[in-house]
Amino acid sequence: MCGIVGYLGRNSAVPIVLAALKKLEYRGYDSSGIAIYNQDELKIYKEAGKIFELESALPKPELTMSNIAIAHTRWATHGEPNKKNAHPHHDKLKNIALVHNGIIENYKQLRDILCDHDDQVEGETDTEILAHVIGYFYNKHHSLEEAVRASLHLVEGTYGIAVFCKDNPKQMIAARKGSPLILGVSKDAYFLTSDVNAILTHTNKVIYLNDNEIAVLNEDNYLISTLDNVPVDPEIATIEWEASSIEKNGFKHFMLKEIFEQTTTVRHAFRGRLYDSMATARLGGLNMVPSDLRKVKRLQLLACGTSYYSCLLGKYLIERMARLHVEVEYASEYRYRNPIIEDDTLVFVVSQSGETADTLAAMKEASAKGARVMGITNGIGSTIARESDGGVYIYAGAEIGVASTKAFTSQVTILFLLGLLFGRMRGISPVQGIEYIKALRKIPAQIEEILKLNDKIREIAAKIKDSTNALYLGRDLHFPVALEGALKLKEISYIHAEGYPAAEMKHGPIALIDENMPVIAIAPKDVLYDKIISNLQEVVARKGRLFTIITEHDEQIEAMSEEVLIVPKTLSELQPILTVIPLQLLAYHVADLRELDVDQPRNLAKSVTVE
C-alpha cells in the first residue's frame, strides 16, 4: 500500500528518493510528496496523481538541494485522495515533516487534545494529527526523539513513520508498529523504506525494525531502541535479490514477466526439498521433528486474496493426500470470531509479502491462543518470517505486479509438498510418493509448453474483452482455480466475474447465462470428467459462450466449446498448477486489450498493510 522512502547521507537526496518512490509505484497509490531541507527551511512538495506530476511540480534543482529527504506514495484511508491530504505533513510551526503508513485509530481523540491547546489542523487525515502531536511535544522537550516517543505512547493503531526537523537536518527518526519499515545501511548513507525493492540499487544491507522500535539516524551512526528506550542490538540482513529482478526485462508489463517466470519459480519452490530416498518432502524450516508432525490432527490455513485461494486448493490437496482435516479461514475474519484451536492444531499463515496486516493480526491471535504458527511467505525477513514459529519460503523472487501470479503457483507447490510430507506419515506408500516427486519435477517443462499458447490466448481475450460479466467454473481441485481466475479478471480488467463449483451453477448462476455471457470452464480429464460435461451441456443449451481449458485428446468438450486451450496432463493433484496459467494470461490480455494499467489497477495495493 502506501510507500515510505527516506534518505540521510552526503549526496543529493531528491533524485535518490524520487527514483526509489518509482520502484514503489506497483504498491498502489493516489498521491505523492517529498519533504527536504533547503536554504534553512523545511520545504514540502506534494501532488495528487502519479509521481511524474510531483516531479513536474518541483522547482529547479538548486532549490531542491538537500542531503535529507522523506517521501511518500499515499493510498487513501482517512481523507480523500487529493493534494491537501497527501504526505508529508507538517506540524503547526512547520518545523517538522512526517510520512506515515498505517492507521491512527484514536486520531479524533488526539485532535480534541490539540484543539484544547489551540492547535489548528487543516486536513482530514490521521497522519496530520500525528504531525501536530509530535510538534506539540517538540515545543516542550526541544528533542525530536523525545517528542516522537511521547507522541507514540499516546497512539492507538498502526504506524511506520519517518520524521525530521529543520532544527537538526542531520538527523532522522523512524518508528514502527504493525506497518513494515526497513533501515538500509550503506557506506555513506542511511535509507528508510517500507519495501526493500526501493533501495536495492543502493544497498542490500538492511535492518528490519520490529514493532515498538525507534531508530535514530544521524550522519555517521544509528541507534535503535524500544519505545521505552531500551537499547536494541539489531541484526543486519543481506538481501539476495538482484536489482535487475525488479525490472521488466523486455516484457510490456511486470505481470506478463512474472507469469513467464513460473517455469523457474515453481522449480525454486521445490528445489532442495524433495527427499527421493524416503519418497517425501523435506521442509526443515518447520522446526518440528517427525514425532511432533505425526501428532498434528488438524491444520488451519489463514490468508487473504489470492493467498486464500491457494490455501483453499491446499485444503483439497492435503486432505486428499494426507487424510488430515484442514480448515481455511479468511485472515481478516479470523480474530473476530474467537476461533477454536486445540492442542493438535497446527496453523499456517500464508502471505506473499509477509506483511499483510489482516494475516499478521490472525497470526497473533492464533499465537495468543497457544497455537504453533508457521508462515508461508515470499518476503524474506518479513514480519511473518520473523515472528512465526517456523515456516517455508516460496523463493519466487520480487513480485511487482499487483495481481499475484507466480506467488500463487509457488504457494500451491509448497502446499503440495506439505501434503506429501504429512501424507507419507499417514498412508501414502513409497511408490506413490515417488510418483508424486517425478510428476512435480516435470511441472516446469509443462508450464513452458503452456506459455507457448500466449498468442492464442490473446486471440481469445479479444473475443471477451468487451463483456461486462464472466462466469468461471471448475470442480474439485479446479473450483479454487476458478475462483482465482475470476479474481484475476476482476482485479485488472474491471469485468465482473465469479468463480463457482460447476455443479452449483444450476443453483442460481444459470439464470445469468445467455448468448452474451462468456463461461470459462476448467475441465481436464479426471474422476469428475463426466460430471462436468453434464454441467457444460447446461451452458451450451442456454447459448452461453463456452471457453474451456482441457487436457489432450478431448474431442467431446472441444466440440461443445467456442474455444479450447489444451494443457499437458499430469497427476490430478498437480493439474491446478497448469490449469491456472492460461487463466492468468487470459486476464492479462483482456486488460491489456482494454488499454488498462495492468500492473497498477485502480484502488488496489500490492501489500495491504492496513486493516
Image (cartoon, rainbow, N blue to C red):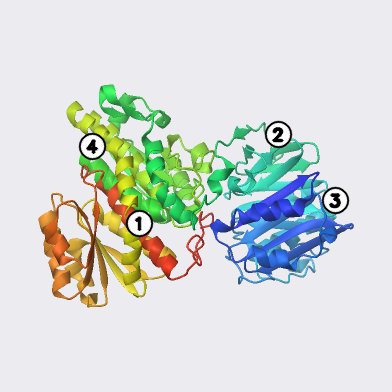
- Earlier in the chain: of badge 1 and badge 2, it is 2
Looking at the picture, which amino acid does disc 1 mark? Answer: Asn
Q: Is residue 109 visible?
A: no
- Earlier in the chain: of badge 4 and badge 1, it is 4
Q: Is residue 451 above or below residue 491?
A: above
For this view, does 127 lie left or right of residue 462?
Answer: right
Q: Could you tell me which secondary element the residue under label 1 belongs to? A: helix
Q: Could you tell me which secondary element the residue under label 4 belongs to? A: helix
Measuring from the top left, give residue 266's x and y in whole percent: 37, 41
Measuring from the top left, give residue 47's x and y in whole percent: 69, 68
In front here: 442 or 20? 442
Disc on res. 360: none
Task: Tell me what residue is drawn at x 35 percent, y 38 percent.
Answer: 346
Give how far apart the Cα atoms at labels 4 and 1 are. Answer: 36 Å
Between disc 3 and disc 4, the foreground one is 4
- Earlier in the chain: of badge 2 and badge 4, it is 2
Disc on res. 231: 2
Disc on res. 142: 3
Measuring from the top left, give residue 366's x and y in whole percent: 42, 44
Disc on res. 454: 1
Give how far apart the Cα atoms at labels 3 and 2 are. Answer: 22 Å
Residue 322, quarter of the rendered image = top left
Q: Are marks 1 and 2 in contact (CB under 8 Å)?
A: no
Residue 499, quarter of the rendered image = bottom left
For the N terminus, the image quarter is: bottom right
Q: Residues within 10 Å of mark 1 (few under 14, many from 20)?
A: some
Q: Is residue 455 visible?
A: yes
